[in-house]
Amino acid sequence: MNPFLRTCVLATTASSSLLLSPAALAADPTELEARIDALESAAADLRRQSEEMAAALQAARAEIARLQEAAATPPAAPAAEPFAPPPPLPPPTTSTAASANAFNPAISLVLNGEYAHHSLDPESYARAGFPLAGEAGPGADGLSLGETEIALSANIDDRFYGQVTLAVESEDGEDELGIEEAFIDASGLPGGVLLRAGRFFSNIGYLNNHHTHTDSFPDRPLPYQAFLGNHYIDDGVQLRWLAPTDLFLELGGELLRGQSFPAGGASHDGVGATTVFAHAGGDVGLEHSWLAGISVLDTEVTDGEDGFAGDARLWIADFTWKWAPDGNLADGGVQVRGEWIRDEREGVFIDADDPTLVEAWDGTRHGAYLEGVYRFDRRWEAGYRYDWLRADRDGPVASEFDPDRHGVVLTWRNSEFSLVRLLLSRDRPNPDDTDTALLLQYQAALGAHGAHKF
C-alpha cells in the first residue's frame, strides 16, 4: 500500500478508537500516552508528505510554463560560419545529364503590338546621307502585331546552358518565323572566363545586346538604325572575362560570320567580322550606379545591304547612370543613357538599281543619342530622347544635312509583365521633310521570364 494512504488509514483508525471507544477513557495512562505519540507521529508524516506534494506541484507548474515559453519562441539561428564554396560537381553521367530540367526548358513568350501614324509615308521615307538597311526606318502605319518573341532556355548540365529565341513578325501581309538567337554558354571555364557559341546579339555598345522589348522607347535611336540596322546579330563565338574585383570589369571579343548588316557577304571563309569590347561599372553609395563601355566592330564587307563593299569599322562608346531611392528602381528613380557611334569606311558604293555604277566611298559618319527616363512609381514613367546623325560631306552618300529627332514617351506598367506605351516624335530625316509620328505600343510577357540586364 502507498505509504501516504497507509498513514492516513492508521491515523483515522487511531482517532476513531480514541474518540469513540469508551474503554479508551479508562485505559492505562502509559497505553494512552503511547497512543497519543502514535497520533502525533502520524500527523507529522501527513504534514511532511503534504509539503512534498506541494513542492512537486510547484515544480510541475514551472516546467509547464518553461515548455510553453519555448514553444512560443522561434529557435535561434545557428551561428554564421565562414563561407566555403561548394565542392565541384562530378562529371555528368547519363542520368545527371538527362535531368528533368533538360527535358522541361523554361518557355517565355513576349507579345508586342502597336498602332502607328506618321505624317510622312513610310514607303517613301528617305534619310539624307544614310541608306536604309536592316530594320532601319519607320514601320508601317496603322495596327500591326510587331515582333513576337518565343524563347526556350535550360541548363544543359553543370557546365552548359542553352537558349533559343524565335522571332515571329509580319511583313507585307505575310508572317515570317526566324531564329533570332540560338546559342550555348559554357560557364565552367577557369579564371572567370565565359564562352558563348551560336547565333547571338553582339556584346558591342549597350542597347545592342538587349532585346528590344526591354528598351525604354518603342523604337531604337537613329544611330542604331543607321549604323546597325537596329541591332547586330550574327553567328560566331564570344569570349568574355569577368575580373574578380568589386568593380564590375568585363573584357571580351567575338569572331563572327560577317553575314548580317553592317557586315555582309561572310568574307574570309565565313569569319568576316571581329569585335573587341570593354565594360566597367559599379555603385556610388546605395542609390547611384553606373556602367560605361567602349567597343569596336571590324568587318570586311563584300555585299552590304546599303551598297557598300570594303573595309568598315564602328566605334561605340556608351554610358548609363541610374539613381533610385534606397537603390530600388522598381519604385521610382531616374535613368540617363547615351551612346556615340563613329562609322569609318574605305571601299566602294555599288548602286542597287544599276550595279555598273560604282563610286569610291572613303569617309566618316557619326551619330549619338541621349535619353532620360523618370519613373514616378511602380506603374508610371516618362522620358525624353534626342538623337542625331552626321553624314559624310563628300562621297557617294554625301549630305550637308544632318538628320535629328526629338521624342517623348509615357509608359504605364500594370506589372513587370505588361505595359502600354505612348511615343510622340518629331523626325527630320532630310532638309525637305519632317515626320511627326505617334506610336501606341502594348507588351505582354507570358511564362518564365528572367530578370533584365542592368
Image: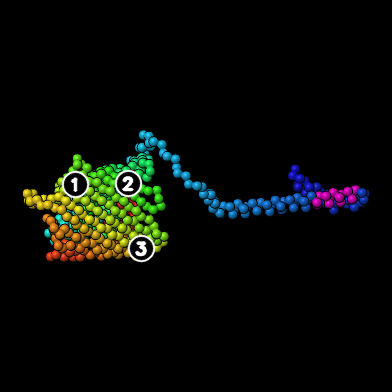
Q: Does the magenta portion include 39?
A: yes
Give SS at disc 1. strand
* Circles 3 and 2: CB atoms closer than 8 Å: no
Mark 3 Cα-neighbour bin, 10 Å: few <14, some 14–19, many ≥20: many
283 relative to 162, above or below? below
Q: Amino acid at mark 2?
A: Arg
**Front label number (3 vs 2):** 2
Distance Cα–Cα, label 1 vs label 3: 43 Å
Q: Looking at the image, is mark 3 or mark 2 earlier in the sequence? A: 2
Q: What residue do we see at 29% from left, 46% from top?
A: 253
Q: In the visual, does 421 lie left or right of 287?
A: left
Residue 277 visible in the picture: yes
Tell me which amino acid carries mark 1. Answer: Glu
Residue 448 horizontal/vertical position (percent): 33, 50
Total of numbered circles in the picture? 3
CA gap, disc 1 to disc 2? 23 Å
**Mark 2 lies on residue:** 240
**Cα gap from disc 3 to disc 2, whole angstroms:** 31 Å
Up-down relation of residue 245 to residue 409 (above or below): above
Q: For the magenta stretch, what is the residue range? A: 31-44
Residue under circle 3?
333
Q: Observer-nearest residue: 78 or 100? A: 78
Q: Position of residue 154 (x, y in %)?
A: 33, 44
Relative to residue 378, is residue 119 drawn left or right? left
